[in-house]
Amino acid sequence: MEDLTRRVIDYARLEGACKVGIATLETLSGGPPTADITYVLPEARSAVCFAFALDQALIPPFLMKEDRRSHERDNIRSNTLASGTSIDLARYLDQMGHPSYALSANNVYRKDTKRGALDMYPDISLRYLAVASGVAAFGLSGNVHTSEQGAGIILGALITSAELTPTAPMTEEENYCDGCRLCMTSCASSMMDPKEEEGVTLGGREYTYSKRRSYLRCEFVCGGFTGLHPSGKWSTWSPGRFEIPEDNKEFIAALRHGMKAYEGRPSVEGGFFNPLSKKKLNLTCGNCQLICVPDKEERKRRHKMITDSGCVVQGPDGTLEPVSSEEAVRRMASMPAETRALYE
């Protein structure tokens, strides 16, 4: 299996993956349900995980609200490339006599949980596979990052019955996260708890990161339904200005209201389809991921890009325009009541 392990790693690298690793039943043992690779393939023995790097040159213009579409296109295509590589490599192994299962890079949720897809639990967590295989390490946000690319990566993976040789997790010294908390201050949804932490055990090794509140909080903002930071000084690329309640019961009602209002807004160029929304979505955030790079000074610069970028308003033709927070308030006040209700 040493030869086959080398071949599958080379296979993913030839497709352009910047990091590739192998996790096994043993190195994933003790993990939560989404680390159980037999969930999708009962005879599973290993997982091949890999990362594709996002184009770093497109991230600052996105954060400064100068160019949204270029990063969105790169992000979507990177997800498609990761999913396609999973399919091709799974087919390769299957043809060699090792039944395999390709995982999607995104937008696949378990249906057998309490609320089904609304719980937003993946079939298999790519983050857990990445950490167990040494492809990436956990940061304070709960996102994962590589030593070279930071968190600006898209993960892909496949599950196989082949007994491949595991690769070692990253060491603590290789993990550059210093708890700077800029990921938290760049999040308009308060997805990450500022005080509490939670952990996961994979292969006998414990990992901790900030406790994540309901994933729907992230969906409310990253889905584009709303995007105004509680300070009112800046927003994501979303023109939505709905408040994000702290109380979870009030939050669910606000989410439903925001999603309904979103359906009445003009369409925006580009975008993608998500099974949780009737209408096409657009990439409007991802701040906690995009701000996280190894160079701390660059993190600070990116944080300033976000907080100095103003607020987005939408025109009747769907155009998204960043303006000052004061101008955004004036624009909203000048809208007819029925139009304004689509945003706040």
Image (cartoon, helix red, strand yellow):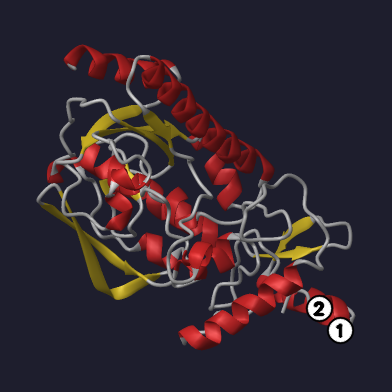
Look at the numbered disc 2 and give the secondary structure of its residue: helix
- 220 and 200: which one is in front? 200
Could you tell me which residue is drawn at 59 percent across and 52 percent down? Answer: 64
Amino acid type of the residue tagged 1 in the rendering? Ala
| Image coordinates for residue 79, horizontal then vertical, percent | 53, 37
- In this rendering, the count of numbered labels is 2
Q: Is residue 200 above or below residue 137?
A: below
Drawn side of residue 49 relative to residue 202, left or right: right
The label shown at residue 319 is none
Name the quarter where the N terminus is drawn: top left
The label shown at residue 337 is 1
| Image coordinates for residue 297, horizontal then vertical, percent | 35, 49
The residue that label 2 is drawn on is 340
- 77 and 1: which one is in front? 1
Could you tell me which residue is drawn at 43 percent across and 51 percent down? Answer: 289
Look at the numbered disc 1 and give the secondary structure of its residue: helix
Q: Is residue 13 above or below residue 37?
A: above
Drawn side of residue 35 relative to residue 172, left or right: right
Could you tell me which residue is drawn at 60 percent across and 76 percent down? Answer: 255
Amino acid type of the residue tagged 2 in the rendering? Arg
Q: Is residue 325 above or below residue 222?
A: below
Could you tell me which residue is drawn at 53 percent across and 34 percent down? Answer: 78
Dot 2, crowdedness within 10 Å: few (<14), some or many (≥20)? some
Asked whether the residues under the numbered discs 2 and 1 touch, taking CB atoms below 8 Å apart as contact, a structural biologist would say yes
| Image coordinates for residue 211, horizontal then vertical, percent | 30, 69
Would you say residue 38 is visible in this rendering? Answer: yes
| Image coordinates for residue 48, horizontal then vertical, percent | 31, 31
